[in-house]
Every structure is written in C-alpha cells, then in structure tokens.
Image (cartoon, helix red, strand yellow):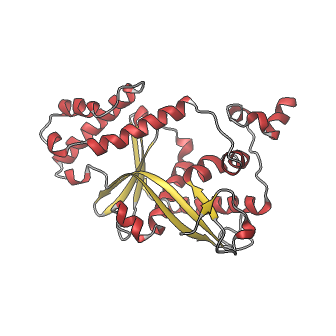
Amino acid sequence: MKEYTYQWNPKDAADPTKPILKITKSSAIGSFKWCPKKYEFAYIERLPQDTTEPMIKGTAVHNSREEFFDEFDMTKAENMSHSELIEYNLGLHPIDDYGDIYRNIATFEAQRFVQARDEGKLDTYIPVINEIMLDAEITIEHDACPKVGYLQANYVVHLQGIIDRMFKDDGTYIPIELKTGMWADWKAGDRRKEMAFYQLLVENASQESLDAAGLDRDIPITHWGWYYPESNYIHIEKVKKASMSSLIRLFVTMLKAYEDNNFKANYYFKTCQHCSFHPICDAAQEDVWI
C-alpha cells in the first residue's frame, strides 16, 4: 500500500510517489459529514480538540469491552448459573466511574451466554475478532455520484478503521458496534454508514491483513448491529445496500471539497457552541456578532 495522509492534494493524484488521501470512519462520518470546516481544523490543520466527559467515558467503556472478551474463560463459565455469571462478568471489568454501565454489560452477557449454552451454540459466543484494525485501498471513480458532481479524476483512497467486534453465526459475519450514550432513532443513518464503512474495509482489505485478523473474505456480512449498554438495548438488522451508496456519496463530497479547497461550515448554534473550534470559526463568530 502507498503512503496516506489527511494533508492531501488532488494535484498529486497522478504521481505514484505521493501519498493518497486517508479516510477513517471518524474523519468522514464523525467529522466531515457534520461539518467540513471542523474536519479541516481537526484533520488537515491538526488543531487540538478539547477532551470531553463523553470522550473519556467512551474510551473507558470501549477498553473494558475489549478486555472482557480477551479475559473471558469459556471453560470456567460453562457450568455457572446465571447469577454466578453476572458476578464473574463484573469481575472482568475495571473499578471506575462507570460501574452502572458495567453492571448492565455483565447482566447482558450472562443472559447471552446462557442462551447460547441452552441452544448448543457456545461456539458463537466469543467474537471472531475483538478490536481489530484493518486497512484497505479503493478507487473512487470520477462519476461515482453524479448527483454530487463529477470528480476531476479517479482517485485511490486509503481506508483505515478499527472494528469493535465481529461475530460469526450461521456461516455469516455480524459486526456489532459498541455505543456509549443512549439509543436514538434519528442517528440510524450515520450508524449504518459506519457499518457500511466496516463492510467496505473487510471486502477490500489485503489477504495478508485478513489472514492476520482471522477473517475469511468468502464469508459475507449479511447483518450488522449496535449495542447500547446504557440503554440496555441491542439492535441487529439486515445490511442496507443504500447505506453503501450513501457512504460513497459522502466520499465523493469529501473529495470535491479537496478539489475546490473549500471546506464549508455547517453552523448550528445548539451544537456548534460546544465545538473546540468555535472561537476560530468564521461562521460561529458571525453568528455571535449578529
């Protein structure tokens, strides 16, 4: 694979010695889609962002979830009762400010384990991958999304992402994303783009990286889902083909912003007032002045 960067220049695309554009789930869906100007500040100019409590909580809970599956002992758990499993699961979590979330996870996992045991499907309990990073390269054709506009060229971009967990059941893969915070239906579109991003990664990753992760390219991803321990909620659904089209449309929009060197601010006062870049954003300061 070639070198890759956020500080990408479309004029270098024809030069094989130059880095190509790096795209991650966070940079494209978590930042650019919400506000191209925020993306420019954070990823191109590399300006620091404030650390918030939701960020701290997210990191802690994600780390504990990864460690839970790394340390879970199937042999030890096999003959435990439901209540014993809850206490065992709790002991696999850290002692910090998020004990209520860990209690929900411990109870959820105890129930899931008992159900798998009763159905004779304990081989599906442990995920086939647990916090694995994958890299892939794809080509975005110049006419990939005429509704957004035609690109000046075909562009090779580098995708990189960490998949929380991937389960295997009935001969298919099911990625499940951990979400801290509360379930909200209005976020479904972005959640599906994130899962489409993971699907694109798996389908285009090198054979070497798939082998290292223990993934089989011939096994399809037919479903995806999200687990919200704070809401005691898990949602699994069939893959939405429209989500992949929507993701590619987002990539084209991003590439055009680079071509035009124009990263517009999507200003909305209720959310932008909490942005780390509010003091230096022209759109925000114009609103303050008005």
159 vs 38: above or below? below
The residue that appears at 30% across and 44% down in the rendered structure is 69
Query: Residue 31 placed where, x, y %?
Result: 63, 47
Residue 187 lies in quadrant: top right
Which residue is at the front of the view, 250 or 89? 89
Query: Residue 207 placed where, x, y %?
Result: 40, 71
> Do we see residue 150 in this rendering?
no
Count of labels shown? 0
Q: Quadrant of the C terminus?
A: top right
Which residue is at the front of the view, 270 or 21? 21
Which residue is at the front of the view, 262 or 177? 262
95 vs 263: above or below? above
Query: Residue 37 placed where, x, y %?
Result: 74, 47
> Do we see residue 147 in this rendering?
yes
Q: Is residue 211 left or right of residue 286?
A: left
The residue that appears at 25% across and 53% down in the rendered structure is 124
Query: Residue 33 placed where, x, y %?
Result: 65, 50
Q: Residue furthest right?
A: 290
Which residue is at the front of the view, 42 or 128? 42
Q: Residue furthest left?
A: 79
100 vs 18: above or below? above
The residue that appears at 58% across and 31% down in the rendered structure is 52
Q: Is residue 85 left or right of residue 160?
A: left
The residue that appears at 33% across and 62% down in the rendered structure is 214
